[in-house]
Amino acid sequence: MYSPVLSVPARRVSGWVAETDPKYARAWLDSLPLADSAEAAREIYQALYTVNRVDLKVQPRLELMALYGPVISTICSGLQTHLLHAAPPLGPKKRQLAEFIRRLHIEMAYGYKCCLRDLSRARMLLGRKSRSVACIERALFHLSEVLLRSYSVYLPYPTSVWRETHELYRLAESLGAVDEPVELGGESATSITVGERYVQTLLLGLANPYQLPHNAAQQLHAFLLQWAKQARIITAPEPGDVAGCFLIDLAADAPPVPFTKRAHELESNTRVLHTRTLLHTLQHFVSRLEAGEPIEKLGLGVDCLDSTCIDLLRRMSRALGENARRRFARRQQSASVFVCVGLNAIHFFANGQRPFGTFAHAFPWLDKPGRLVEAADVAFVELDEGEDKPDAPSVPLSDALASLPAENYRVDRWQLRDVGPQGMSLARYGDGTPIRVGELIGVQQPNDLGRWRAAVIRWVKSPETNSVEAGVEVLAAAVVPIAARVPGKSSAAPGLRLPAAEVMQRPATLIIPRGVCQVGDALELIEEDAEIRHVRVLRLVERTGAFEQMVYAETLPA
């Protein structure tokens, strides 16, 4: 049998006390105040920490781990709700909470690895193989939870988690038990194999979770629980056909990478993850959603809105499909840049730090009574079209603009790590504006004041408290602030016009708040001290939770 190299805590005397008799441990766990998750979590962590560092026989340890599992799951679910709306970088308290949740799963994995160690040393133990397989599956589950909790809040995952995940799978292979079902218990009485659990974890890592929008990692995980069975582990792909295949290095502390080697070059410690069937399923779901089919009819097993779901499926399809390689090399650079976050902030600074209310008065159609409204964090000037409404009394536009709240946006100083024609890597230390994947930012060089570049955040990591690293794609070397309005509608929204970049083969585009218009709609645009431009939206380039980028073409006035 293969002897895996797994980390387990050394035996030591703890100042904490824990029940080691399963009968009394069950009574103690039943008495825990699960409604007060923080208090219960502290007590169970102390007990679990102690149990993992004392001598116990195999059977009591197995029973204790089975008792702790459901309680840990309940507690972690309760604590995780405090992190649902936390944007990176996490503050000290929330980061401590995130690391504590992760630590609970690390201790659970330790417990099952201790069980594997004890089972391997036991003599003449009935059912040793089936018990070992169950421990492998449970250890894999908790290591995958460590990864998921890390990805969810953009923390770097702990060292050796991927390596031990591969080691556990190799152990199951040596036992000939990769496809042996393990009963999960509970009311559903479902089962799973070690191979299925391992593939779920591999696919989670393949999805580039640090590039996922906030809370999308949890939705992806829920999707994989149902659909990961369509991927499988093989020894080698067909010669010359490596689409949808990924190389697994069982000796590496890393997730799979795109397959580039030929079959005869594979080594004994490598495997191949074949995802082509799952890729076709993802593409099929995307096609049905794009055709307008309701998400409820797809049976995805994921609870999310249509727009969020289709974005998640597209991202997963790109991750499993032909990955676009970086066309230009990056060069290391140490410098500082100024960064503002959000479409409104970029519009404000690119417009000479003048609020949108003063910008919008350039519209001829705004020379009439109106009132202020707010939608999606954007200030609009809504016009009265004809008769007055009792709940919306008309006021002079000058008074409305004067009452517009003062815009107050922050500029942070970031450190530039590396830069290329299409993107850059940035880092920030200390307090600053929270950021999210998919957020629009403005970047300004200290020696080029007055010119803002538009960029979008593609990945985020938070290695330490109050520090954050981000990879950004530059959308345009300069922006033109605009106001946009759909003819016949009564509100104007701030936006940005991005000039065409022929070198990058990028057409001229617009960036506007999400939901202002649809593909095919006509728009009226105005720049400061310029005539109205009539355009039509031709194609959607990108839609995130913060903005929409669209290709447009000039048209004649209607």
Image (cartoon, rainbow, N blue to C red):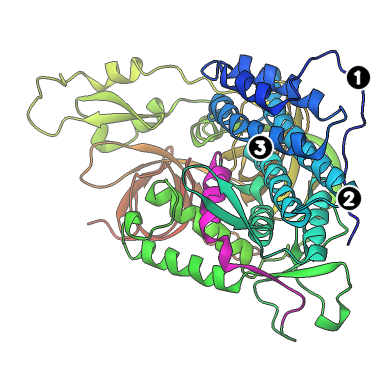
The crowd level at tag 2 (other Cα within 10 Å; few <14, some 14-19, many 20+) is few
Q: Tag 2's secondary structure?
A: loop
Q: CA distance from mark 2 to mark 1?
A: 27 Å
Q: Amino acid type of disc 3?
A: Ala
| Residue 354 is a magenta residue | no
Residue for point 75% across, 44% down: 425
Which is nearer the N-term, disc 3 or disc 2?
3
Dot in front, 2 or 1: 2
Q: Tag 1's secondary structure?
A: loop
The crowd level at tag 1 (other Cα within 10 Å; few <14, some 14-19, many 20+) is few
Q: Tag 3's secondary structure?
A: helix
Asked if the residue at tag 1 contacts the one at tag 2, i.e. Cβ–Cβ closer than 8 Å, the answer is no
Q: Which residue is mark 2?
A: 123
The answer to whether residue 349 is left or right of residue 466 is: left
Compared to 415, does 530 lie above or below?
below
Could you tell me residue 450's position as x and y percent?
A: 63, 34
Q: CA distance from mark 1 to mark 3?
A: 23 Å
Could you tell me residue 191's position as x and y percent?
A: 56, 55
Residue for point 83% across, 35% down: 57
Which is nearer the N-term, disc 2 or disc 1?
1
The crowd level at tag 3 (other Cα within 10 Å; few <14, some 14-19, many 20+) is some
Occupied quadrant, residue 537: bottom left
Q: Which residue is mark 3?
A: 66
Q: Amino acid type of disc 2?
A: Arg
Instruction: Residue 225: give its label.
Output: none
Residue for point 60% across, 29% down: 71
Taking the image as drawn, is residue 342 in sight?
yes
Taking the image as drawn, is residue 90 in sight?
no
Looking at the rendering, the stretch of residues picked out in magenta corresponds to: 214-237
Q: Which residue is mark 1?
A: 13
Could you tell me residue 378's position as x and y percent?
A: 40, 30
- The count of marks equals 3
